[in-house]
Amino acid sequence: MKAEIIAVGSELLLGQISNTNARHISAGLAEIGISVHYHTVVGDNADRLGQAIRIAESRSDLLIFTGGLGPTKDDLTKETIARHAGTRLVYDDEALVSIRAWFDRMGREMTENNKKQALILEGSTVLQNHHGMAPGMLLSADGHHYLLLPGPPKEMEPMFTVLAKPLLARLAGFSGPIASRVFRFYGIGEAELEHRMADLLDNQSNPTLAPLASDGEVTIRATAKAATREEAEKLLDGSETEIRKIAGKHLYGYDDETLVSKAASLLIGNGLTISAAESLTAGLFMSELAEQPGISAALAGGMVTYTAQAKQEQLGLPESLLEEKGAVSEETATAMAVAVRGKFGTDFGVGLTGAAGPDPHDGKPGGTVWIAIASGEGIRTRRLLLSGMRNTNRIRAVKAAMHMLINIISETSARSE
């Protein structure tokens, strides 16, 4: 089965929002053996959407639409497909009750145009929206399948994963369980990882392996099909064994884990505390940690010491150190980490200093970063030479610091076992 994803919305063409829905759907379809050959984006215009539908039908079996199911006049996906497929729009009673209940809970009056969201294509399978209002639907007609999903990701993603994906798997002729596992790597590029895994990737069949690069990280999604869930998981275990042999030292987490969530869970799980003194990252390290649930048990506090004066007055760094070694130096990062750890009495103290770029700072080229982590076992430092944009360099510096922290805690735990 060949699929095409058609995102409907002028805001996508204007660059006001990113089309993250297509990425989520494509990854999900790959897991059930459906190939996505095209991504299309079309504005809120019935004629252009109709043209996109006709083109998609000429090359795809499954057409998946996101967006255009709302209450306003420019929400025209259902109407356009109904005319194209020669079917009617009818009200879905369950959806209408759900929409009215939402307005009652909010204490708001439901306007007439909101009823439009309860309209469905006659004869379609309805996918109820448990995270919003407009239901989704799946219609099969004249040799094609039309899947309509809401545009907001918080509504689309659970609807696709929980309701639509099993239906599509059956359409594609696969009824057994599917298991997937995402392996997350740091400190190795996508090209290098693919080079090391060339034999594994070239000979893959079941499980299938799909590499994906993000900023400073790489993921491998392994997907297995089998008669039972247990058999599928065993196939994934086999892939993991091979992947660990190839790049195990760069593997830091699985599935939805991130460097930040992994670092936070290790801190919390081991009863450890942390503080940070930040210069170029200006609080970003602490802000990222603060997004993690339960982090108050680990994050004691910290300081943003952006200038040399702040480093002296807030952290007590000697003026002579800054003059002799410079603000962007291993010695300054170390002194920051030691000082903040002492001030807050934490297990770890993190020092981040550098030239975010693009201009040089303190005689160092943009992208030069020093990270230091102080603990009871001593000091660990790392220098980064980054080439990205200013804010990209700040984000990468934080990720590197999180990875250092993960390694330190993991190594310490392994020695104590």
Image (spheres, rainbow, N blue to C red):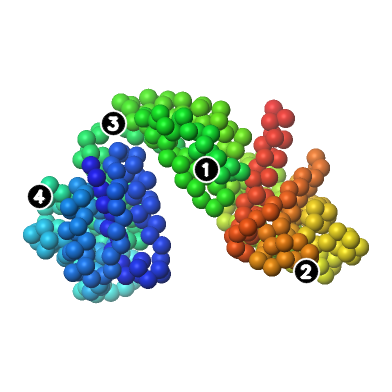
Q: Amino acid at mark 1?
A: Ala
Kindly identify the residue that appears in the image at 28 percent across and 68 percent down. Answer: 43
Quarter of the image for residue 1 reads top left
Residue at (18%, 69%) from the top-left corner? 47
The number of discs equals 4
The residues bearing labels 4 and 1 have C-alpha atoms spaced at a distance of 43 Å
The answer to whether marks 1 and 3 mark residues whose Cβ atoms lie closer than 8 Å is no
**Marks 2 and 4 close (CB-CB < 8 Å):** no
Label whose residue precedes the other's in the sequence (1 or 3):
3
Between disc 2 and disc 3, whose residue precedes? 3
Location of mark 4 (residue):
142
Q: Which residue has dot 1 on it?
A: 191
Q: Earlier in the sequence, mark 4 or mark 1?
A: 4
Left or right: 220 in relation to 405: left
Query: Could you tell me which secondary element the residue under label 4 belongs to?
Result: loop
Amino acid type, label 3: Gly
Rendered location of residue 303, percent (x, y):
74, 62
Indicate the secondary structure of the residue bearing disc 1. helix
According to the image, label 2 marks what residue? 307
